[in-house]
Amino acid sequence: MEHNERVHSEQTFRSGRAKKGLKYAVAITAVIFFVELVGGWLSGSLALIADAGHMATDLFALLISFLAIKLSVKPSTKQCSYGYFRLEIIAALINGVILCVTAFFITIEALERIAMPKEIQTIEMLFFGMIGLAANCINALLLRKEKDNSVNIKAAYIHIISDLAGSVSVVGGALLIQLTGWMALDSFISFFIAVLIVRSSLGIIKEAVNVLMESVPKELDIGDIENTLLHFDHVQNLHDLHVWALTNGINALSCHLQVDDLQEGQKLLPPIHRELKEKYNIDHVTIQLENERFVKEKTKE
């Protein structure tokens, strides 16, 4: 229990900082969504409306992320012995799916606009695009420091970066349409925004699925971990080595260690735990000690 409390305390500290950044990001995104929606309606720009739609999904995604972080720091219970860390991963997966659906509808609308171009008020498009660009820059700065501590925050951060790229496209497109008069450019900018959305969302979905499938975290090499364990004195062999992540930054390991002396093996457990924590950031370690006799009897069974 003491170990779980330490891990929970570390996660609570990280989540507290992330929650503060998310709170401000939610407020800014909500304001900019309404500003860009009105701007898109006034200017007739699909790119601006697409960016507003992306903002709407981002607002929903940020709210999901905020709620997940708030719930993820709840202490473990008898039913959820590991706690609620995985809620962040589930939120990230939902966000990734939402992004893909958003990109699909933007693409459909852009195709329709190419077939039937609409007049665009470029001055209004540029003005509201600049507001969105400034807001997304602020949001990106708010979440940048915490993105590596949580796949959920990383998902929210990528939402914001996609918005930032979309805002840059809107501003650049407004200038080009003003210079060239080519209204279809608005639809092509929308395609570009959709591609950015899909590209970022697939990465988030893959990372979330890897955690839910209990795959080895990408920053860890299971072969290197195996060599580290075999390097300890009295360790003869190991099997059933599993390494996975409860959530981003909280890793777990379980294995069977065959030792030449069970009493000496017991003395090895504290230094093994320290080594795994310091070298690989593995918090939850479960090791079953076995000797040669035990292995032979198990094999006969």
Image (cartoon, rainbow, N blue to C red):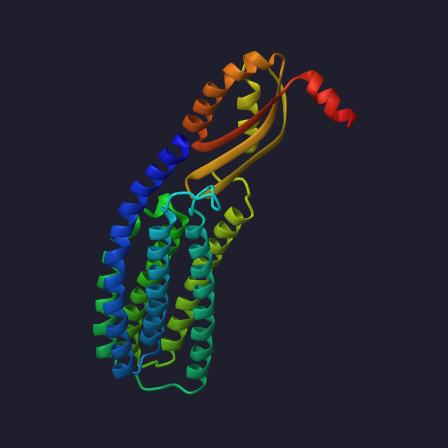
**Residue 160 image position (x, y, % from top left):** 33, 59
Position of residue 69 relative to residue 268, above or below, is below
x%, y% of residue 157?
34, 54
Q: Which residue is farthest right?
A: 300
Instruction: Report x, y in % for residue 27.
Output: 24, 63
**Nearest to the observer: residue 88 or residue 223:** 88
Would residue 64 be visible to someone looking at this image?
A: yes
Q: Residue at x 49, y 36 (%)?
A: 252
Q: Residue at x 25, y 57 (%)?
A: 23
Q: In this view, does 247 lie to the left or right of 166?
A: right
Q: Which residue lies furthest to the front in this view?
A: 78
Q: In this view, does 86 lie above or below 286?
A: below
Q: Quadrant of residue 227?
A: top right
In this rendering, would 289 be left or right of 198?
A: right
For the N terminus, give its image quadrant. top left
| Residue placed most toward the observer, 10 or 102 | 10
Q: Where is residue 156 in the image (x, y as percent from the top left)?
A: 36, 56
Q: Left or right: where does residue 295 sit relative to residue 84?
A: right
Q: How many labels does the image show?
A: 0
- Residue 217 visible in this rendered orientation of the protein: no
Which residue: 33% across, 56% down?
66
Q: In which quarter of the image is the C terminus?
A: top right
